Image (cartoon, rainbow, N blue to C red):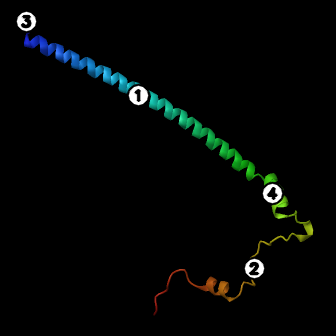
Amino acid sequence: GFDPRRIAKFTGLGALLLFLCWQHVQATRIGYRVELTRREARALRSRVEELRLRVDQTLAPASLAARAGSKLGMIPASPNALRSLSDRPNRTGGIFPRLWARLPLVAQPRT
């Protein structure tokens, strides 16, 4: 016959078996997603490295000099055209720098 306890045991065992199967399928799906994400991350890291290398090559002094000459028509300056700046401050800045230098940093109270 049909023993209610026996039916409950088989139903519980069946539910447990279905749960374990579902859990295994979900773990497999997540594993595939993780692997896909890792591959995408590797590809993105590789792309970032390629772009960094390209930026380094583009901003290299030799590359900049070549483009300045070919695209902009620039030529290196002659040594006679170069001017060096002195270390002392320029005193011909007008009245504003002199006034600014005399202003106090904190407002003084009026007496």
Q: Nearer the viewer, residue 101 or 109?
A: 101
- The quarter in which the N terminus is drawn is top left
**Could you say which disc has been placed on residue 72 in the image?**
none
Q: Distance between the residues labelled 1 and 2?
A: 72 Å
Residue appearing at x 68%, y 89% in the figure? 95
User: Pointer 3: what residue?
Assistant: 1
From this view, report whether residue 106 is shown above or below residue 70: below
- Residue that lies at the very extreme toward the top in this rendered image: 1
- In which quadrant is the C terminus drawn? bottom left
Residue ID at (64%, 42%): 49
Distance between the Cα atoms at labels 3 and 1? 42 Å
Residue 29's disc number = 1
How far across and down, in percent of the image, does residue 38 sit? 52, 33
Query: Does residue 30 appear to the left or right of 3 in the view shown?
Result: right
From the viewer's side, name the closer residue of 12 and 55. Answer: 12
Q: Is mark 1 on a helix, strand or loop?
A: helix
Mark 3 or mark 1: name the one nearer the start of the chain: 3
Mark positioned earlier in the residue sequence (1 or 4): 1
Image location of residue 94, percent across then percent down: 71, 87
Q: Mark 2 points at which residue?
A: 90
Question: Which residue position is annotated with label 4?
Answer: 67
Gap between marks 3 and 4 measured at Cα:
93 Å
3 or 4: tag closer to the N-terminus: 3
Residue depth check, mark 1 versus mark 4: number of the one nearer the observer: 1
Kind of element beneath mark 3: loop
Q: Is residue 60 left or right of residue 6?
A: right
Cα distance in 3D space between marks 2 and 3: 111 Å
